[in-house]
Image: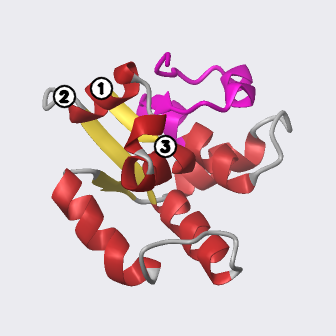
Amino acid sequence: MKLLLDTHILLWLLNEPEALTEAERAAIANTDNSAFVSAASLWEIAIKQAAGKLKLPGPAPEWLPPFLDRTGLEPLAIDRTHALTAGALPAYHRDPFDRMLVAQALVERLFLVTRDRALTRYGAMTLEP
């Protein structure tokens, strides 16, 4: 199974792993699965940290890449198909970062690991918590 972690799932994995469900932890840890982190999530984290909305172990550019390397999470770049798909999505959800994650999940046929039930309206495959 190929997974795409929502930003809050990534932050919980880093700071509060106990907030993840057993199903989420098992799916992410399963070496038969591939778990991806979108560039949109990294961008969102950096923006929120710079705005003082996130307290993190240090500057995101310093600690986030090594964390991703240690955990085996794979980067997912944003390409033009992702961007155009996100722009064409209905306005069920107004957060542009979440809309990008949905677009990437749809285009790449990834299971979106999220607790944001509003995202299910887009028809992307989701991992049930």
Q: Where residue 34 appears, x then y in whole percent?
A: 24, 36
Dot 2 lies on which element? Answer: loop
The front one of 40 and 56 is: 56
Above or below, comparing residue 71 to residue 118 in the picture: below
**Which portion, as a residue range, is magenta?**
104-129
| Residue most extreme to the left | 31
Q: Earlier in the sequence, mark 1 or mark 3?
A: 3
Residue tagged by mark 2? 30
The front one of 112 and 114 is: 114
Distance CA(mark 1)–CA(mark 2) = 5 Å
Dot 1 lies on which element? Answer: helix
Residue tagged by mark 3? 9
Q: Are marks 1 and 2 in contact (CB under 8 Å)?
A: yes
- In reply to whether residue 39 is colored magenta, the answer given is no
Residue at left 48%, top 54%?
A: 11
Q: Are marks 1 and 3 in contact (CB under 8 Å)?
A: no
Residue at left 49%, top 65%?
A: 42
Residue tagged by mark 1? 27
Q: Is residue 1 visible?
A: no
Q: Amino acid at mark 3?
A: Ile
Q: From the viewer's perspective, is 119 left or right of 71?
A: right
- In reply to whether residue 119 is colored magenta, the answer given is yes
